[in-house]
Amino acid sequence: MQRRRWLQLGLASAALLAVAGSSAWLTPAGLDGHRLTAAGRTVLQAITRAMLDGRLPAAPGALDAELQAQVARVEALVAGMPQATRSELSRLLGVLASLPGRSLLAGLSVEWSAASVRQVQQALESMRHSRLSLRQQAYHALRELSQLGHYTAPSHWAAIGYPGPTDL
């Protein structure tokens, strides 16, 4: 390889690292301490609607109330997580809230709040069946978070046949 080619490669690599570093700096946080940020809440609500389609109320008012309750349950779960796990979750939700992250990680070109349930389901399925383990891991983390948040509510236990804890 010629010296000029090495210099070009070095400059291109430096530019790529600068762009990646600045985009990471500009990515919103998904969590603020134990609470979801507005960006994290938007991502979680869209994913909840897609993952729990058919199990959520159909009426708009009841759906909004259930999504708010889901946010509260997830925040309670997050509060019990170790700091390292909260940091990773915050980064994941933040990346998904950004346009580049949403496009590259989830393959979703529209905002989470504007995406239909079907569009979000297709994005999640593409993550689930991706050849990249990072996309698969992100999918599984989002699925587990939405499922745990939903089924920690005693009112949802009957749907899975769980009678609740027994008295000792």
Image (cartoon, rainbow, N blue to C red):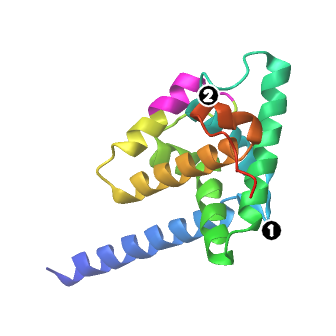
Task: Between label 1 and label 2, give the one nearer the viewer.
Answer: 1
Within the image, what quadrant is residue 31 found in? Answer: bottom right
Q: Quadrant of the N terminus?
A: bottom left
Q: Report the number of numbered marks.
A: 2
Q: Label 2 sits on what residue type?
A: Ala
Question: In this orientation, which residue lies closer to the viewer: 131 or 108?
Answer: 131
Residue in the picture at 67% in, 68% down? 86
- Say few, some or many: other residues with alpha carbon within 10 Å of mark 2 (under 14 / 14 to 19 / 20 or more): some
Contact (Cβ within 8 Å) of mark 1 with mark 2: no
> What label does residue 115 carry, if any?
2
Furthest residue to the bottom?
3
Task: Tell me if residue 11 is in the magenta stretch.
Answer: no
Residue in the picture at 70% in, 47% down? 152
Q: Which residue is mark 1?
A: 33
Furthest residue to the front?
168
Residue 40, image x, y percentages: 72, 51
Residue in the picture at 72% in, 59% down? 77
Mark 1 vs mark 2, CA separation in Å: 27 Å
- Say few, some or many: other residues with alpha carbon within 10 Å of mark 1 (under 14 / 14 to 19 / 20 or more): some
